[in-house]
Amino acid sequence: MKRLFKHIVLGLISALIFSSCSSSAPTMSPKQEAALGEQEARKVLGQVRLSKHPQANAALRSVGSNIARAANRPDYRWAFYLVDNKKQANAFCLPGGKVFVYTGLFKYAASKDELAVVVAHEVAHALKSHGVKGAQRQQTAGLLGIALQVGMGIGGVDSQTAREVNKVYNQGATLGYIRPYSRENEYEADAIGLLLMARAGYDPRAALTFWNKFGKQGQRVPEYLSTHPAAANRIANIRKMMPKALALYKQNRYARRK
């Protein structure tokens, strides 16, 4: 174990030296993000079937347009798509404001307020460029992994030890670098989304009922193994932010009727 740890440390030192000589991933401009989002949206639309359910589509368009107005980003080309898949309780947002909501989520979103929880959360991801930054973080981890292999090669590490080091590195990068960052993004999207929905005139207390219902579905895994926060932690954080969100809601409770 000491020998393996020594090789990991030496390999990482070499990897860090190697990676420091390369340029970091460039930050994408809003225009570039929008172009990427358009490109990826076309791919998604070619792979999924959109729902024709009139009431559900009308609800999504209404909630989406109100949340987008509250986001106040006219440079974003917002679009809200309802994917016909009742088995998937899922939603995601592509760079630049392309939001996809699966019909399977409607069994947890019983009202427009609860639907606004989902939409505002995804809009918040887009506003903070979480998708692009997450992809860049994965790219960085991958490049560092390559640099680690180069470092071990320079250090003359044998193939068996190199495989063990790579395995440890991949697990560590996933659990200690990628997934914690993803969970931080989720908490941030919760916070921003809560204020967005309140500003758009939707009752932020719906976030508690929605996440409570949603948290009971599916197989539970320890938070450190997941890209998303545990339901109890998520709800606890939302409760802390609720007074501010409620105050904003009381100021804007009729905003969505305008």
Image: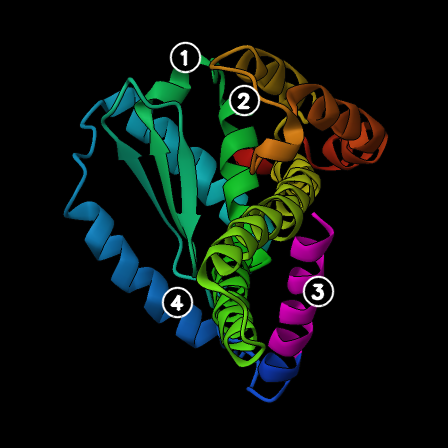
Nearer-the-camera pick, 173 or 184 = 173
Q: Which three-letter amino acid code belongs to the residue tagged 1?
A: Lys
Nearer-the-camera pick, 183 or 226 = 226
Say which label, 4 or 1, has the lower sequence index: 4
Location of residue 103 by image quarter:
top left
Image x and y of residue 165, in percent: 56, 56
Residue 159 visible? The answer is: yes
Read off the residue under disc 4: 34
Q: Which three-letter amino acid code belongs to the residue tagged 4?
A: Ala
Image x and y of residue 77, in percent: 39, 60
> Residue 107 — which label?
1
Q: Which three-letter amino acid code belongs to the residue tagged 2?
A: Glu
Say which label, 2 or 1, has the lower sequence index: 1
Read off the residue under disc 3: 9
Task: Determine the main secondary structure of the stretch shown in magenta.
Answer: helix
Query: How far, Cα to Cα, is label 2 from label 1?
Result: 10 Å
Q: In this view, does 89 lie above or below 229?
A: above
Q: Is residue 232 above or below residue 159?
A: above
Say which label, 4 or 3, has the lower sequence index: 3
- Give me the residue at 28% from left, 58% from top: 40
Say which label, 4 or 2, has the lower sequence index: 4
Say which label, 3 or 1, has the lower sequence index: 3
Tell me the element at label 3. Answer: helix
3 and 1 marks in contact (CB < 8 Å): no
The segment highlighted magenta reads 1-16
- Give me the residue at 59% from left, 83% from top: 18
- Give me the residue at 49% from left, 26% from top: 115
